[in-house]
Amino acid sequence: MRGRVLIVDDDRSTCELLDEFLGQRGFRISTRPTADEAFEVLRTEEFDAVVTDLNLPGMNGIALCERIKANRPDIPAIVITAFGSLDTAIAAIRAGAYDFITKPFQMEALLLTLDRAIQYRNLQEEVKRLRTAVEGSRAVPGLVGESSPMRKLADEIARVADSESSVLVTGETGTGKELVARAIHARSRRREGPFVPVSCSAVPEQLLESELFGHVKGAFTDAKAARKGLFLQSIGGTLFLDEIGEMPMDLQPKLLRALQERRVRPVGGDEEVPVDTRIIAATNRDLETAVEERQFREDLFFRINVIRLDMPPLRARGGDILVLAQHFLEQFARRTGKAVKGITSAAAEKMLNYSWPGNVRELENCIERAVVFTRYEELIVEDLPEKVRNYSRSQVLIAGDDPSELVSLEEAERRYILRVLEAVGGNKSAAARVLGLDRRTLYRKIERFLPESDRSPDKD
């Protein structure tokens, strides 16, 4: 296919002629009789060029060019009119038209102009792609860290940003999954479009469908006016579905259909509306286990899990803990007007030893509190929260030569399983991978070895 072209003309015979001629030469053609209808379809569908008549009912071709330039500057527009004059040509070019052709015109001349316009658009897209690739090779703004897991993540973000494939970002609560989604959007072809986030766990179940797909007037008791859902609000951009593992089972088939068909039906509506948005989802749950336990649809999981990025927990990022701590310290020092410049080695050691179950969010809160309480230019141990000051890691084995201190193999296994579960934040699938067990075997061992009070919340 040489390109997709939108023809805007209220003369049906002209539309049919151009459709036949350009279609035979490898173009895919759509037609609209008015500028308003043309602009609406440009908001939801992709075209390589627009060919518009100057004289149209309602908004004319020059006004349409102005709207295209303001909202879709990547699409070149060609104006055709039987009333050719220098003034009209200048007005069209100033309005943003790529070129201007007067009737009667040779079809081959239009063909040549179209090829040049599409080639021009492709060159613009290539320049954007190269610029994005260069930007992606740098550190990711908002994601502070120099550890190996973060360098790997930054490389993955740069590589997937220009793809249109769905992305699933996994990681514990507080690791910064939304920052990853925003970084992907900022480096994508859609970065000029909206980034629309929604937490599937924060919206009441009975309202989530309306929030995502919108509703028509009178769809339910409080629907006093029609409302566009988040799918429509994110057209041309990215829709971020946070905590997608918490989406109600009844709503999952409707989301799956929207992703497959790229169309949504507002609540109470009769017609589906096309949408053009990229989906990035995030979860702190193990969706594979949720699928096995029939708590999440397998087909939806495969649809959102085309590309998977794992956000590492803070405890796995080594020295990033101190890099982030200094970053937050500088922020809060400026905000409070305090002359706090650093962290003592003793306080830093306590922070490195702590497991940070709340991850980056917990660290940020810790540093904010410490800056508020400190009376010195450096944060000391006493400035840290008590649980950070007094934290000690669980011991897997008791070291020593005294036989009374040694434990049975079964006890050693129990302690090691407990230690691994602590290290992975209670994620049983991650623990199973570390231990070299399947999930069912791990579940049996947990039930056997650990009393109910010692079992971590099921984060699968």
Image (tube, helix red, strand yellow):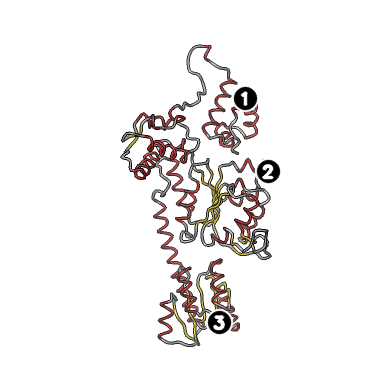
Quarter placement of the C terminus? top right
Disc 3 residue type (three-letter): Pro
- The quarter of the image holding the N terminus is bottom right
In front of the other: label 3 or label 1?
Answer: 3
On the image, the x and y values in percent for residue 333 come to 35, 42
Residue with the mark numbered 1:
449
Q: Residue at x 48, y 80 (%)?
A: 79
- The quarter of the picture where residue 14 lies is bottom right
Determine the secondary structure under disc 2.
Answer: loop
Residue highlighted by disc 2: 294
Q: Assign a secondary structure to mark 1.
A: helix
How much space separates mark 3 and mark 2, taking CA atoms? Answer: 55 Å
Q: Which amino acid, mark 2?
A: Arg
Q: What residue is pinned by disc 3?
A: 57
Mark in front: 3 vs 2: 3
x and y, in percent, of residue 135 in the image: 40, 54
**Is 134 in front, or is 31?**
31
Left or right for 183, reference 434: left
* Vertical side of 447 occupied by 104: above or below: below
How crowded pointer 1 is (Cα within 10 Å; few <14, some 14-19, many 20+) is rated as: some
N-terminal-most mark, 2 or 1: 2
Please say if 83 is above or below 79: below
Please identify the quarter of the rendering in which residue 353 is found.
top left
Residue 187 point in image, percent of width and height: 45, 55
Residue 238 vs residue 440: left or right? left
